[in-house]
Structure formats: structure tokens, C-alpha cells
Amino acid sequence: ASHDAVIDARGICYSYGAHRAVNSVDLQVQRGEIFALLGTNGAGKTTTLEILQGFRAKEDGELKVFGTDPRQHPGTVRARTGVVLQEAGFFGEISVTATVKLWKSLSSRTDDVDRVLHTVGLDHRASHTVTSLSGGERRRLDLALAIWGNPELIILDEPTTGLDPESRRTLWSVISDLRGAGTTVVLTTHYLEEAEALADRVAIMHGGEIAVTGTLSEVLASRPSRVTVELDD
Ligand code: ATP
């Protein structure tokens, strides 16, 4: 394993009852890179992210996040990781600022409300209620909560699914700015263009397995027929 690996997973497996959802997955994510897990519905992406965060116990394999097993040292991983769940959707008649302040009171990390809202481009919506935000703005609010306290690792489960192209591009620019600041990002997506816009490296997941890993151009060049089939949603 590289010295700079933030995530080092080898042979990770997970089953729901008799259904093997994650099968012998190897994943290495280096510090400061954006890594995209690409795949269609049911490929096993969300389950894999949940294992990386220690929310689910792997059945088999070796896993190190920041050099430790997230099940043995959950606090270590949580303190250094920001997460956006799939369609987390904070709803409410409270303002954007109040939502971030609520988060502030729950978090062990310190940060500045104005900084995080500025980073995600929501300054002008600060006093608006969450229910009045557009879909894209809500995702940006989710991202504001994930970046609270400048975590070293940010995990995003389908950060732009269901958004219009313009909102997606806005989120892409916020996410690529995170890399500029040295943050490591792992995200899942159904969209090839999202991986193309953001990712330093990608893994194509299908049927619980990683079919191929590399830069997007390496992946597309190495096994074109298989990749095409797997991305054809
Ligand atoms: P999506 O893009 O739809 O989020 P995914 O790639 O994230 O899909 P997972 O959500 O990890 O895939 O699901 C992988 C497999 O495990 C699927 O076949 C799914 O039906 C199954 N699965 C997921 N969650 C559960 C659960 N709680 N109980 C039983 N089976 C589950």
C-alpha cells in the first residue's frame, strides 16, 4: 500500500442475506485525489461507501481508512470525514444559516458559517428557508454540511443525481475546488460526464465487483466493450 493512501481496501465482501452485494472489492484512494465509483443501479456503490465509513461491517477482506479499521476506530474516521448521503435532503422552514448552525452544534469540528456558505455559493440564500431552495441549492447545502470543519476526506453518494445540467456543473466546480484545497474526495455517480469532469481516477462497479480501475481514458481504452455495456443504464 502506498504511504499516501487515505483508503486501502482489499478483497472487501458484503452480503444482504444470501445476496452478495459487494464481492472482493479492491480500492485504493490516494490523498488529494477525486475518485469516482461509477456504476448502474444496484452495482454495490452505496454499500461500498457504507463499509468505508464503518456503518456496515465487511464480511471479509482488509480495510484501512487513515491507516485504521473504521469499525475499530470509528471516531478517528468520523472526525476526519465529511459525508453527503444520497438525497440527504434537509427540509424545513428554518433558514439556510440556521441549518448550518444546527450542524455546527452537532459537530465536533469548528468552522465558520459564512465560510462554508460562501464555498458552496449559497451566501445570497443564507436567510432563505430550506424549503424555498431549488434542488441544486439543497445539494449545495448538503455539501456545505459535509465540508464543515475542513475534513480531509469527503464522501459523496450521487451528489448530482436528478439535477439539471447547469446545477450539476455548479456542483462540479465546488467539488473540484475542494481538490484544489487538498481534500480527498470519493464519490459515486451514474454519469460518465461527471467522472470525466471531476475524477482523477475511476472504478467501474458492476454486480458487486470492480470491473476496472484507472484514469477514465485508461478505463475506456482498456476494456471498451465491457465498460460500454456496464454504463449503458
Ligand atoms: P444505486 O445506484 O441504486 O444507489 P448502488 O450501486 O449504490 O445502487 P447498492 O445500494 O449498494 O447499489 O445495492 C447493491 C445491491 O444490494 C442491490 O442489489 C440492492 O438491491 C441490494 N441492497 C441494497 N441495500 C439493501 C438492503 N438494505 N437489504 C437488502 N438488499 C439490499
Image (cartoon, helix red, strand yellow):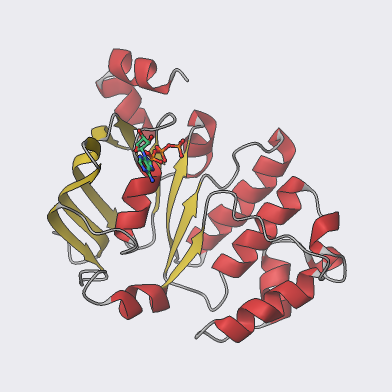
- The residue drawn where x is 86% and y is 56% is 132
Residue 99 placed where, x, y %?
Answer: 72, 73
Direction from residue 37 to residue 83 in the image, left or right:
right
- The residue drawn where x is 51% and y is 32% is 191
State the image quarter where residue 160 is shown. Answer: top right
Tell me how many marks there are: 0
Residue 120 placed where, x, y %?
Answer: 68, 62
Q: Is residue 213 above or below residue 153?
A: above
- The residue drawn where x is 31% and y is 16% is 224
Q: Nearer the viewer, residue 57 or 120?
A: 57
Q: Is residue 31 above or below residue 191?
A: below
Quarter holding ligand 1: top left
Residue 171 placed where, x, y %?
Answer: 64, 49
Direction from residue 185 to residue 61 in the image, left or right:
left
Q: Nearer the viewer, residue 96 or 91?
A: 91
Direction from residue 107 to residue 200 in the image, left or right:
left
State the image quarter where residue 17 is shown. Answer: top left
Q: Is residue 202 visible?
A: no
- Furthest residue in direction top, as rendered: 225
Quarter of the picture holding the N terminus: bottom left
Residue 155 placed where, x, y %?
Answer: 45, 58
Q: Is residue 26 visible?
A: yes
Direction from residue 35 to residue 135 in the image, left or right:
right
